[in-house]
Amino acid sequence: MRPYGTLTGGPDDGHRLQLTVDDGPHVLVEVLRALDAAGLATSRLAVREPSLNDVFLSLTGRPADDTTPAAEPAAGPDTDPTRSAA
């Protein structure tokens, strides 16, 4: 089976697998055919659009509800509050 995207899950997840792809609806038929060819049956299947939290996490690397403050930018000549513009 060719790579479709990011696969998560495994034996500890109760045989649940989650496949994250850029173009889910178009990849769906190909994935189902590959599973069928491998003799693997599905009991449930869902396609969903990413939530705002999913998008935020992919852009920032942290969940939207993370209360850890973002890193402060390093002080430099343009950001040093003790220097005045000349």
Image: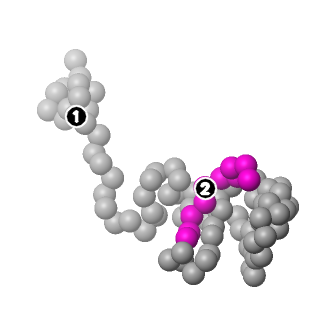
Residue drawn at x 31%, y 57% is 69
- The residue that label 1 is drawn on is 75
Dot 2 lies on which element? strand
Residue 28 in percent (x, y) is at: 80, 62
In the picture, measured across the screen, residue 39 lies left or right of residue 73, that is right
Color style of the picture: one colour
How far, Cα to Cα, is label 1 from label 2?
Answer: 38 Å
- The residue that label 2 is drawn on is 6
Identify the image quadrant of the C terminus: top left
Circles 1 and 2: CB atoms closer than 8 Å: no
In the picture, measured across the screen, residue 13 lies left or right of residue 35, that is left
Q: Residues within 10 Å of mark 2 (few under 14, many from 20)?
A: few
Q: Residues within 10 Å of mark 1 (few under 14, many from 20)?
A: few
Residue 50 in percent (x, y) is at: 65, 63
Residue 2 in percent (x, y) is at: 73, 49
Front tag of 1 and 2:
2
In reply to whether residue 15 is colored magenta, the answer given is: no
- Residue with the most extreme top position: 86
54 or 5: nearer the eye? 5
Amino acid at circle 2: Thr
15 or 63: nearer the eye? 15
In the picture, measured across the screen, residue 71 lies left or right of residue 47, that is left
In reply to whether residue 6 is colored magenta, the answer given is: yes
Residue drawn at x 16%, y 27% is 83
Q: Earlier in the sequence, mark 1 or mark 2?
A: 2
Which residues are the magenta region? Answer: 1-10
Residue drawn at x 31%, y 61% is 68
Amino acid at circle 1: Ala
User: Is residue 52 something one can see in this rendering?
Assistant: no
**Residue 39 found in image quarter:** bottom right
